[in-house]
Amino acid sequence: MSLDRSLDTNLSKLKTNEYPGRGIVIGMTANLKHLVQIYWIMGRSENSRNRVFEVDGDFIRTKAFDESKVTDPSLIIYYPVKCFNSWHIVTNGDQTETIYEALKSDKSAESALMTRMYEPDEPHFTPRISGIINNSTNQKAYMLSILKSAFEGKICQRVFFNYDNFIPGVGHCIHTYANNGNPIPSFGGEPF
């Protein structure tokens, strides 16, 4: 399949997904001038829908839109975007901190994520998705990952997708859910 046709197919797949949940796209602009990280949030519960993004210095964090409506801040208030030296981190939860601290200690993002699991929101067990760009002058590469439940929360699958180069005008997308449901099925397969 050609690249253009693949991009059209994948865009259509995303548009027709009733509930992809939270998502990450990492790529490069067509003019090669910028690397791109996109993060989006969606929610079904009032608590999940009650959040917005806020710039905090060089980082981005989520905050409650209406503090009076917060029922549980533990899974909705976090830093989805942080950077350290040439590393740019984007995630859907507090694993951003785990990755950030590992990189500051000269450890890998993968080793940091080996200490984490999916979110404890039974029965959904929302996957933790992460994206990391290495924007060093010698090597521009990126990684996407998903930590998801298997067998109704009995096992955590940790899957890493490493890309050694960017394609101008193209990004890879991963999101938390395959579609809507009860419980909501986790994203499956490779980033598209």
Image (cartoon, grey):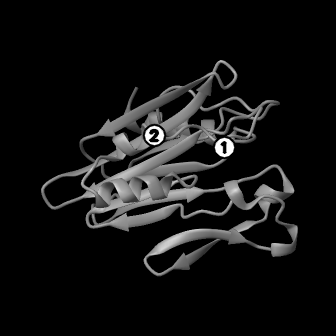
Drawn side of residue 82 relative to residue 147, left or right: left
Q: Along the line of sight, which residue is nearer the eye, 1 or 113?
A: 113
Based on the displayed image, in which of its 4 quarters is residue 103 positioned? Answer: bottom left
Q: Hey, what amino acid is under mark 2?
A: Thr
Left or right of 91 on screen, residue 166: left
Q: Which residue is disc 1 drawn over?
A: 15
Outermost residue toward the left in this view: 138
Disc number for residue 153 = none
- Mark 2 vs mark 1: which is more N-terminal? 1
The mark lying in front, picked from 2 and 1, is 2
Tell me if I can see residue 14 in this picture. yes
Q: Nearer the viewer, residue 88 or 163?
A: 88
> Viewer-proximal residue, 4 or 135?
135
State whether residue 37 is above or below residue 158. below
x 51%, y 51%: residue: 95
Q: Is residue 87 left or right of residue 41?
A: left
Residue 40 coordinates in the image, percent (x, y): 61, 56
The residue shown at (57%, 32%) is: 148
Q: Nearer the viewer, residue 93 or 182?
A: 93
- For the residues bearing labels 2 and 1, Cβ distance under 8 angstroms: no
Crowding near the residue tagged with mark 2, few <14, some 14–19, many ≥20 C-alpha atoms within 10 Å: few
Q: Residues within 10 Å of mark 1 (few under 14, many from 20)?
A: few
